[in-house]
Image (spheres, rainbow, N blue to C red):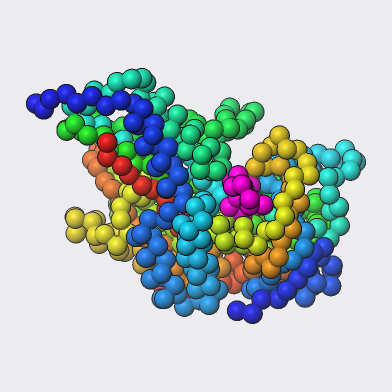
């Protein structure tokens, strides 16, 4: 066992503040390159024009230090907490939320969290609470990944409790149907995260985690890599295109994560992500 | 693509000249309003009360900006999903609304209202909020500031880029564009 390392939660707050701002101003390089590649290949003149706007938009956001999109998202975090880390100086969850509060204020980011969703829908005015998924892992480091998740694409996501007899055919059809139904709403070209297996809670986390993969990366399991390629081809055959105005670029990537499930179940979740796939990480 | 330059308020003549697939550049005043503002606008109409802006010929922009940095009129300002305003749009068109800017699918009822009332639906590029903000030169909140990003604001725009999705003749670019590029997988 390694020695216990102390980490002050004030460092977490400072890191989160910065992650919120950089995630919203700087489009990840892989997404930017994928948009450029798509622009060169898009057959639809309107689609190519839209892709050009998105590239220019990313350039403006990075240069002028302004948000890529006005919907700067709910702040979603994946935290890998090393088991040899001792967090000191305060409450970890409060420290993350304080970082979100500061980041969304200092970065001129939109506050898009509504409390009492069924009735009052009051804006919490500081974009808290954050959505935090924590895993305890070996080591003495803390890795924090921030994802700015906009509402328009999240709304088009789906949870499908399928029958095992439906197999891959039923599952892949449900993914394509989700994207088809969404049409222009989630700001295509989209990135699709697919979770397979687990339970209703875990399958949606898998789908969201899948979105963190680098565009252009190939899944290490060739069987899953083939499933991803098949889904991407079927989605891009739908004709929805950039912004749904018609074209060949409906999705930039499809990423699948799977895990075992109950013998009676076949859970499948589709997390739809807009082209502004904003996420960034830091290791403390 | 050569864009048609149009100015607001929109006349029936201009609306009738627009076809699904046309690129336009809009100059003039447009009104920012999204979910909460629409609920209140419709409540005012139903109560027979005055609206915070002249609806005849107006163009609304379904948008809630990020906060403006010092020295800028507005923060990032791209469209939000229009479908959430579908419940309110036909009544507004009945009372003179001529144009809507947003992104995403509209219901059959909203599309029929555009034909009946001679109105048009434009898509602006979702997620291009930094770029679109550069075409907005003025921004004044004119109603319900307590709604924050959901308040109604009067926006001055110059050559604001958009594409006609639904025209007043029944044209629908979302359907036509998709059909044109769909392939067998």
Q: Residue furthest front?
A: B71
Residue situated in front as seen by the camera: B125 or B113:
B125
Residue placed at 56% from the left, 38% from the top? A111
Q: Quadrant of residue B52?
A: top right
Q: Quadrant of residue A33?
A: bottom left
Residue situated in front as seen by the camera: B125 or B35:
B125
In the image, taking residue B85 as reference, residue A164 lies left or right, namely left
- Magenta stretch containing residue B22, yes or no? no
How many marks on residues? 0
Q: Does residue B30 lie above or below A200 as drawn? A: below
Q: Which residues are magenta?
A: B64-84
Residue placed at 58% from the left, 52% from the top? B76
Q: Quadrant of the N terminus of chain A?
A: top left
In the image, taking residue A220 as reference, residue A187 lies left or right, namely right
Q: Quadrant of the C terminus of chain A?
A: top left
Residue placed at 40% from the left, 62% from the top? A32
Residue B127 in picture, x, y percent from top left: 53, 56
Residue B125 in picture, x, y percent from top left: 57, 62
- Magenta stretch containing residue B66, yes or no? yes
Residue A264 visible to the viewer: no
């Amino acid at each position: 066992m390694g020695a216990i390392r102390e980490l002050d939660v004030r460092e977490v707050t400072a890191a989160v503040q910065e992650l919120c701002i950089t995630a919203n101003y700087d489009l990840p390089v892989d997404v930017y390159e994928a948009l450029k590649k798509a622009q060169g290949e898009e057959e639809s003149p309107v689609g190519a024009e839209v892709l050009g706007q998105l590239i220019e938009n990313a350039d403006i956001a990075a240069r002028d230090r302004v948000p890529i999109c006005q919907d700067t998202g709910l702040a979603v975090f994946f935290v890998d907490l090393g088991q040899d880390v001792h967090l000191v100086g305060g409450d970890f969850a409060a420290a993350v939320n304080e970082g979100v509060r500061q980041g969304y204020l200092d970065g001129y980011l939109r506050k898009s969290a509504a409390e009492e969703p069924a009735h009052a829908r009051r804006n919490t005015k500081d974009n808290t609470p954050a959505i935090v998924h924590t895993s305890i892992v070996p080591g003495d480091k803390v890795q924090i990944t921030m994802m700015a998740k906009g509402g328009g694409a999240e709304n088009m996501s789906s949870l499908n409790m399928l029958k095992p007899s439906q197999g891959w055919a039923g599952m892949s059809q449900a993914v394509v149907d989700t994207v088809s139904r969404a049409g222009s709403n989630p700001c295509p070209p989209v990135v699709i995260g697919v979770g397979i297996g687990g339970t209703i809670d875990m399958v949606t986390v898998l789908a969201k985690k899948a979105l963190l993969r680098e565009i252009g990366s190939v899944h290490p399991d060739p069987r899953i890599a083939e499933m991803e390629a098949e889904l991407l081809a079927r989605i891009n055959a739908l004709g929805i295109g950039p912004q749904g105005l018609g074209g060949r670029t409906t999705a930039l990537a499809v990423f699948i994560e799977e895990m075992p499930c109950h013998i009676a179940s076949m859970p499948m979740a589709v997390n739809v992500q807009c082209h502004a796939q904003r996420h960034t990480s830091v290791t403390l | 693509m050569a864009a048609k330059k149009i100015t607001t308020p929109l006349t029936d003549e201009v609306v009738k000249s627009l076809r699904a697939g046309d690129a336009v550049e809009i100059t003039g005043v447009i009104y920012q309003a999204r979910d909460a503002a629409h609920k209140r606008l419709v409540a005012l109409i139903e109560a027979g009360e005055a609206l915070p802006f002249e609806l005849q010929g107006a163009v609304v922009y379904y948008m809630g900006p990020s906060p403006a940095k010092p020295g800028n009129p507005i923060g990032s300002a791209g469209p939000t999903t229009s479908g959430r305003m579908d419940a309110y749009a036909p009544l507004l068109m009945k009372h003179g609304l001529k144009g809507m800017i947003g992104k995403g699918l509209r219901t059959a009822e909203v599309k029929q209202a555009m034909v009946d009332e001679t109105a048009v639906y434009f898509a602006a590029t979702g997620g291009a909020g930094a770029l679109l903000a550069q075409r907005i030169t003025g921004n004044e909140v004119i109603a319900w500031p307590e709604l924050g990003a959901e308040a109604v604001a009067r926006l001055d725009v110059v050559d604001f880029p958009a594409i006609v999705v639904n025209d007043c003749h029944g044209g629908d670019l979302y359907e036509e564009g998709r059909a044109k590029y769909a392939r067998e997988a």
